[in-house]
Image (cartoon, rainbow, N blue to C red):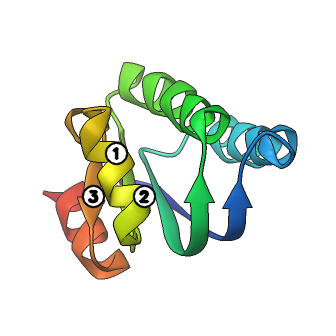
Amino acid sequence: MDSTCILELAGEIDLDSAPAFRSILSEATSHNPDHIILNLSRVRYVDSSGFAAILGTAKAVRALGGSVSLVGCNTAVQRIVKLMQLDAVFGMFATEEEALQAARA
């Protein structure tokens, strides 16, 4: 049976918060979930250190056949994801339900 970890985040994910963010992601991946859904609906900003942490997590989860999805990204975060072509690495969804359905497909 597939296991999914949903993390609801808030504020800014930047150089100052990146160590704590990496720790949260590391804890989530230590349980070997098949899918990780990052709800970013309350996140105002993600810088390169935040995206590096997400990419590292996606690499680890994908190596085991899983996926990482982003949910509720604001316009600024969506723009960065598309500019960096990261939407090819992880799914982007409006709601957690959409991300869960995609993970189960």
Residue at label 3?
92
Residue topped by disc 2: 77
**Label 1: which secondary element:** helix
- The residue nearer to you, when weighing 32 against 75, is 75
Instruction: For the residues labelled 1 and 3, say whether their Cβ atoms are less than 8 Å apart.
Output: yes
Q: Earlier in the sequence, mark 2 or mark 3?
A: 2
Asked if labels 1 and 2 touch by Cβ distance under 8 angstroms, the answer is yes
Q: Neighbour class for label 2 at 10 Å: few (<14), some, many (≥20)? A: some
Q: Tag count in the figure?
A: 3
Image-based side of 78 in relation to 23, left or right: left
Q: Residue at x 76, y 44 (%)?
A: 27
Find residue 101 and name its label.
Answer: none
Q: Position of residue 29 (x, y in %)?
A: 63, 39
Look at 63% across and 41% down and name the residue there. Answer: 50
Tag 3: residue type? Met
- Residue type at mark 1 is Val
Q: Is residue 11 above or below residue 64?
A: below
In this rendered view, identify the residue nearer to me: 28 or 46.
46
Q: Looking at the image, is mark 1 or mark 3 nearer the viewer? A: 1
